[in-house]
Image (cartoon, rainbow, N blue to C red):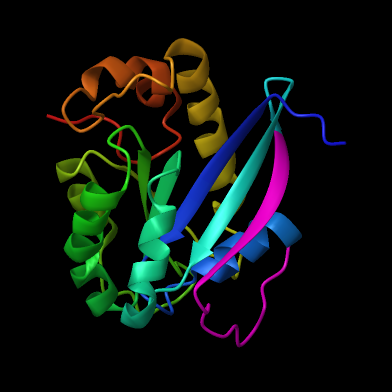
Amino acid sequence: MDDYKFLFKVVLVGNAGVGKTCLVRRFTQGLFPPGQGATIGVDFMIKTVEIDNEKIKLQIWDTAGQERFRSITQSYYRSAHALILVYDISCQPTFDCLPDWLREIEEYASSKVLRVLVGNKIDRDDREIPTRVGEDFAQRHNMYYLETSAKESDNVEKLFNQIAAELMEVRILIDFTTPVNLRMGWEQYTHYFGCEDQGLFSTCEFP
């Protein structure tokens, strides 16, 4: 029987081919599968992490990015505690589609969901989206921002561990059963998230 204090559902969304599955497998299995095929529908993996001596179980849901699976993946948004929106820093179209994904998040996800924007594949030398552009987008939409490489394992542990830590803090300090609009009331959370002091995500302060 698993022994854990908190259970959180984390859902990855974004265009096909941005590396969502590779991020999940790198974190949960320590593997980078070469030639990873596209996810069909939805898949999930589980990993337990320890934050401040508390065990946290993460259910990590990897969703398909293709249009034909959207009606399936949308149903997984509502119960998510955190949503990771992933794009490929070497592929401009995956960044251009972010507003479409955000509209889905606004429509189907809880207003209190923790949202993180991730620019993946920073190991590539053909970057098309500068870091500052990603940071600016995240700032405008009240999201955390982090750049990762599933291939080289850069910032992958940091991404999921920090999400677990932030969710644990919110769960302790704020009743998750009370509806909260993070987008309209972000200021009350910045202290709880500790981003100003720890600098664990690039984008933490919002106008």
Tell which of 79 and 187 is nearer to you.
79
Tell which of 88 and 115 is nearer to you.
115
Q: Quadrant of the N terminus?
A: top right
Q: Quadrant of the C terminus?
A: top left
How many numbered discs sit on the rendered protein? Answer: 0
Magenta-span inclusion, residue 26: no
Residue 133, quarter of picture: bottom left
Question: Can residue 160 be seen at all in this image of the molecule?
Answer: yes
Residue farthest right in this picture: 1
Magenta stretch: dominant secondary structure: loop
Compared with residue 28, is residue 72 higher up or lower down, i.e. above or below?
Answer: below
Residue at figure coordinates x 26%, y 29% from the top left: 182
**Residue 206: x %, y % from top left:** 18, 31
Compared with residue 127, is residue 162 higher up or lower down, i.e. above or below?
Answer: above
Question: Can residue 150 be seen at all in this image of the molecule?
Answer: no
Q: Is residue 199 left or right of residue 20?
A: left
Compared with residue 111, is residue 66 higher up or lower down, i.e. above or below?
Answer: below
**Residue 160: x %, y % from top left:** 56, 45
Residue farthest top in this picture: 173
Magenta-span inclusion, residue 32: yes
Residue at figure coordinates x 32%, y 20% from the top left: 189
What span is colored magenta in the figure? 30-49
**Residue 68: x %, y % from top left:** 35, 82
